[in-house]
Image (cartoon, rainbow, N blue to C red):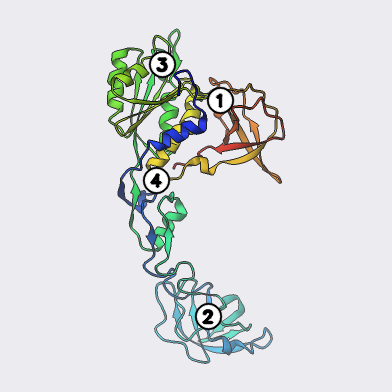
């Protein structure tokens, strides 16, 4: 690629994923596994549920004994025992008998149905059955959910509350998950100030030092450190040396061609290989990506929206690949754009938009002014809608590709 040639978005994402490897797995207790990515298949040693149990409070019976039962002509059976949750009945059921049973309790031997308590009247050791029931009524059979030996979760599964519940149900206290990558975040610029400081002339609130670590956590990484780097060659190189000790490094600002942009020369001096610099993208053109040994390094633009958009398009897939999850591009969908969107050909545009589900599918509406400095355009955004590189503008009613934004920790 020529020095002044811009790489397109898809080629840039592919170049990132070609140079990222999954990290080694580690044992994780299921109590701390929320949002982690499974690195092994999980099978159930036994059936779930482990035994036949009742779906209702009522009475375990032989279905044949209830055949003559009617509301105005109930069948009377002797209540000979009770089966409650955690305390099975102590005897089998014989003809002409019933055993009181609780929801989830073991079905006693000899019983083939459960009559709801609402369809009975019990007193003095006997129960009147007012309805006939067929065999299997209100019984959950062993293995109805999971059979012994079944694989319940595959590698690459993101562990949400349901998945963790399934792990517990098959008796797993811990599972092997891909290690979360450590990420060192650098924000560069003499103008940067923290939220609590009084703004000096020319000062800018350092929003990237807060949005980027939040994105790291949201997308499955661990923030190793966050640093502010002033516009000084020596300070920049020293900070980058520290950042390269992490599994992944993210730098915002300082990657352009100005006299005070020191990131690219410092990375070159440290031996980092440049894979691409400059993406045919708005916002996010001055994006740099390279590798130093096994550490992927991302130089993102300093404009706050550009930093978020390029993180989502390039850093997020890298983190997901490192933890063994799928590419978020595989989760993209389409939506109908509800307004005209003017643009010139030459760069793809990522439009921050809200999604609304209607009868004909998703509809997308831009959130606000789409300038790369308008951080509030990310508030309420559900997705990034793609206006392709060669497009000369989009018309209301066109269907466009959208990449949904992460809404839960991954």
- In percent of width and height, residue 293 lies at 29, 31
Which comes before the other along the chain, label 3 or label 1? 3
Q: Nearer the viewer, residue 369 or 289?
A: 289
| Residue named by callout 2 | 59
Q: CA distance from mark 4 to mark 1?
A: 32 Å
Nearest to N terminus: mark 4 or mark 2:
2
Residue 197 in view (yes/no): no
Closer to the observer: label 4 or label 1?
Answer: 4
Above or below — where is 242 with respect to 167? above
- Tell me the CA gap for discs 3 and 4: 35 Å
Q: Which residue is mark 4?
A: 324
Residue position marked by numbered label 3 in the rendering: 192
- Front residue of 108/40: it is 40
Q: CA distance from mark 1 to mark 2?
A: 61 Å
Q: Nearer the viewer, mark 3 or mark 4?
A: 4
Label 1 close to label 2 by CB (< 8 Å): no
Mark 2: few, some, or many residues within 10 Å (few <14, many ≥20)?
many
Q: Quadrant of residue 218?
A: top left
Q: Residue at the spot x=45%, y=80% of the render?
A: 82
Per the model, the C-alpha gap separating discs 3 and 1 is: 19 Å
Which mark is first along the chain, 1 or 4?
4
Q: Position of residue 123 (x, y in %)?
A: 54, 84
**Residue at image point 38% right, 43% down:** 323
Comparing labels 2 and 3, the label whose residue is closer to the camera? 3
Give the mark count.
Answer: 4
For the residues labelled 4 and 2, say whether their Cβ atoms are less than 8 Å apart.
no
Q: Secondary structure at mark 2?
A: strand
Residue 225 visible, this angle? yes
Q: Which mark is residue 376?
A: 1
Q: In this rendering, is residue 145 above or below 4?
A: below
- Residue 341 position in % (x across, y down): 67, 26
């Amino acid at each position: 690629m020529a020095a002044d040639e811009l790489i397109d978005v898809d080629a840039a994402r592919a170049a990132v994923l070609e140079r990222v490897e999954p990290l080694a797995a580690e044992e994780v207790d299921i109590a701390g596994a929320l949002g982690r990515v499974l690195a092994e298949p999980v099978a159930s040693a036994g059936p779930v549920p482990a035994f036949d149990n009742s779906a209702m409070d009522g009475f375990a019976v032989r279905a044949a004994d209830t055949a003559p039962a009617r509301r105005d002509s109930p069948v009377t059976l002797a209540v000979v025992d009770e089966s409650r949750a955690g305390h099975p009945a102590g005897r089998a059921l014989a003809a002409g008998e019933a055993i009181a049973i609780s929801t989830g309790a073991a079905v006693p031997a000899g019983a083939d149905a459960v009559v709801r308590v609402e369809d009975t009247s019990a007193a003095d050791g006997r129960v009147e059955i007012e309805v006939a029931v067929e065999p299997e009524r209100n019984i959950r059979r062993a293995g109805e959910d999971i059979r012994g030996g079944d694989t319940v979760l595959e590698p690459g599964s993101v562990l949400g509350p349901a998945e963790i519940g399934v792990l517990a149900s098959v008796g797993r206290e811990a599972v092997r998950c891909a290690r979360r990558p450590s990420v060192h975040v650098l924000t560069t610029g003499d103008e940067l100030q923290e939220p609590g400081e009084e703004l000096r002339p020319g000062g800018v609130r350092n929003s990237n030092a807060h949005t980027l670590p939040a994105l790291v956590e949201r997308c499955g990484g661990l923030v190793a450190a966050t640093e502010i780097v002033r516009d000084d060659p020596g300070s920049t190189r020293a900070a980058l040396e520290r950042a390269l000790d992490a599994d992944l490094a993210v730098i915002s600002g300082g990657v352009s061609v100005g006299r005070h942009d020191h990131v690219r020369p410092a990375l070159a001096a440290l031996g980092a290989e440049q894979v691409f610099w400059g993406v045919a993208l708005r916002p996010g053109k001055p994006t740099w990506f390279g590798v130093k040994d096994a550490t992927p390094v991302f130089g993102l633009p300093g404009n706050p929206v550009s930093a978020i958009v390029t993180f989502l398009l390039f850093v997020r897939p890298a983190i997901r690949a490192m933890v063994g999850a799928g590419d978020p591009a595989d989760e993209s969908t389409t939506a109908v754009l509800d307004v005209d969107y003017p643009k010139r050909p030459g760069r793809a545009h990522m439009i921050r938009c809200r999604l609304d589900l209607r009868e004909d599918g998703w509809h997308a509406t831009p959130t606000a002014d789409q300038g790369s400095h308008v951080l509030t355009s990310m508030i309420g955004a559900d997705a990034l809608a793609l206006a392709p590189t060669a497009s000369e503008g989009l018309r209301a009613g066109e269907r466009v590709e959208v990449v949904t934004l992460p809404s839960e920790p991954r």
